[in-house]
Amino acid sequence: MKSIIETSQAPAPIGPYSQAVLSGNTLYTSGQIAINPKSGDLIMNTIEEETHQVMTNVKAVLAKAGMNFDHVIKTSIFISDMDNFGRINEIYGQYFTANFPARETVEVARLPKDVNVEISMIAVK
């Protein structure tokens, strides 16, 4: 049994997928990029602002499922330039209080809408 999670507080999908799927007590989020859900604009002035917007979007999806970052057990981060790793990591870390989730960070050739960072998560209630 699965439930589709959708919220207007995060960007609408730009393809045939859901913002997240809840299966039992486990939430699988789709990758979020730095689209402001209210304006539809990409937030890419700095990598820090971009990462904050991505994390804000993921936070909204988690909240719609009744969860928060404390529920996250696994994160996948895709970045277009590994030289931004430290700056992204610094912002990312601000959203977790303790017991950090497992994670991989992978440099990729290109991301949707030519953004610099995309993050997906798995969370358990």
Image (cartoon, rainbow, N blue to C red):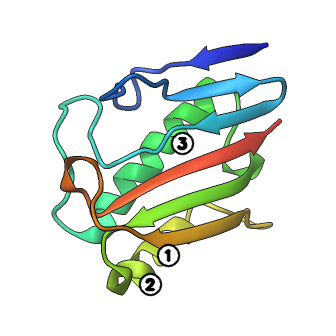
Please state which amino acid type lies under the numbered disc 3: Lys
Name the residue that disc number 1 marks.
89
Residue bearing the label numbered 3: 59
Badge 1 vs badge 2, beta-carbon distance below 8 Å: yes
Which dot, 3 or 2, sits closer to the camera? Answer: 2
Disc 3 from disc 1: Cα separation: 16 Å
Dot label at residue 112: none
Say which quadrant the C terminus sits in: top right
Which residue type carries mark 2? Gly
Figure quadrant of residue 74: bottom right
Query: Which of pointers 3 and 2 lies earlier in the amino acid sequence?
Result: 3
Q: How would you rate the neighbour count of disc 2 (Cα within 10 Å): few for under 14, some for 14-19, many for 20 or more?
A: few
Q: Which mark is residue 86?
A: 2
Measured along the vertical axis of the image, is residue 118 above or below residue 25?
A: below
Amino acid found under the numbered disc labelled 1: Asn
Circle 1 crowding by C-alpha within 10 Å: few under 14, some 14–19, many from 20: some
Image location (x, y in percent) of residue 54: 40, 51
